[in-house]
Amino acid sequence: LKARSVRPHDFWFPPSSSLFLRRWCSPVAAMADSVPTLFGVPIKYLVLCFLVFQNGGAVLLMRAVRALPGQNDFVTQTAVIMQEVLKAGTCSVILLIKDGSLSATWEDKVETLKTSVPALLYLVQNNLQYVAVGYLDAPTYAVTYQTKIFWVAVCSKFLLDKTVHRYQWLALTMLMSGVCFVQLGQSSPSSAGGDDPTSSGLKALGIGLLLAAALCSSLAAVAFEKLLKGSTADMWTRNLQLAFFSLLCSILPLMLSPDLPKIWENGFFHGYTGWTWACIAMNGWGGLLIGAVIKYADAILKDMAIGASICVSAFGSVLLFGAELSPNTLSGIFLVSWAVPLYAGRANFGLAWLSPQAVQDATKKDQVLAAVRELEAVQSMGKPAAADESPSLQAAE
């Protein structure tokens, strides 16, 4: 009634209908009151928007830095380690300001060890990707790895008991297709296949490894979401624990890397420039932003934001670097632009099967309210209400 600007005493509700409307509306009001906001805007939408532009900006920054002379002399694995050090340092400072100590972070040994699960999954994912890239051309790699968008939804459904509606599955399909189109539009003709000497058996192996890598990435995101939302530990504590285990998982591949002698000879920070540190800061703090997205939204929306950021970076490449705006890129941007509002239930074109259940319920509520008003109008005239003469009463029945 409040949403419809109708005063409660304007109509008389029978006791049964009044109870029915109260039961229908009260859970919605309780959920609306529990949503955290900042300056009146839900934090979920803020962090999702930040992630879209942060991830897109990070891609553009790294592409610009790579084009500069002398910017590729450092060992990439050392930059990954410094990103984890930056995340751990940032979380430590925040926890020291907030709590005055870091002892609470490591008090519960069992909860701390649980955070090692997503870190180990990310380690397995990175190694599987490293092996798979040797067996696949760029377009096949780009398309296959985007199946993680579906894996996240499947893992969320079975591990977190999350409901994914039909229109949301369609939105995820469109998002995956759009991201694939954008990445295919950005790939160079030389990487599009051609005379590829890799046998079909090795290609199948590469696809299998990459699918496993996508599954590990999805499991890690869902596991971290469960850790953030299923315990009393706050977001900064979980991020510090994850950064610690991720740091250990980053050092191990470096110790086995052929670049280790180069590091011993030239130093850990050889080849670092101001632009290198800018990329480390962008990606390190971006990792903390992903944690905030998983905390206030979920792992599925995180992947949707990253998919949208790929379109942002593609459009930025056209403006900043003169990249070609191919038909594939345009098609991908269109699909992603439709998939994002469709997932939220806001681009259904009036089709009931593309509408969220809340919209369908709201339509039913409008029908019930219309029936109640018509019933009162008929009763005030002293006439008996015939349901077969009123479509709205038929709908209410």
Image (tube, rainbow, N blue to C red):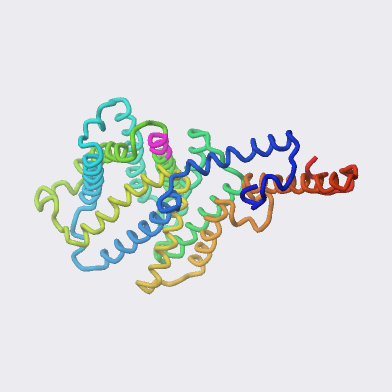
From the image, which quarter does the C terminus lie in? top right
In reply to whether residue 221 is colored magenta, the answer given is no
x and y, in percent, of residue 85 in the image: 21, 45
Q: How many marks?
A: 0
Of the pair 2 and 314, the residue shown nearer to us: 2
Of the pair 89 and 192, the residue shown nearer to us: 89
Q: Is residue 113 left or right of residue 30?
A: left
Q: Is residue 328 left or right of residue 47?
A: right
x and y, in percent, of residue 29 in the image: 56, 42
Question: Vertically, is 275 above or below 361?
Answer: below
Q: Residue at x 57, y 47 (%)?
A: 169
x and y, in percent, of residue 7 in the image: 66, 48
In reply to whether residue 224 is colored magenta, the answer given is yes
Q: Residue at x 24, y 46 (%)?
A: 90
Q: Residue at x 59, y 50 (%)?
A: 170
Q: Quick one: which residue is furthest to the left in this view?
A: 265
Q: Residue at x 51, y 58 (%)?
A: 336
x and y, in percent, of residue 293 in the image: 40, 47
Residue 253 seen in the figure:
no
Of the pair 227 and 65, the residue shown nearer to us: 227
Residue 225 seen in the figure:
yes
Question: Vertically, is 39 above or below 121?
Answer: below
Q: Main secondary structure of the magenta part?
A: helix
Choose top left, top right, bottom left or bottom right for residue 104.
Answer: top left
Question: Vertically, is 147 above or below 107?
Answer: below
Q: Which residues are magenta?
A: 222-229
Q: Is residue 176 left or right of residue 318?
A: right
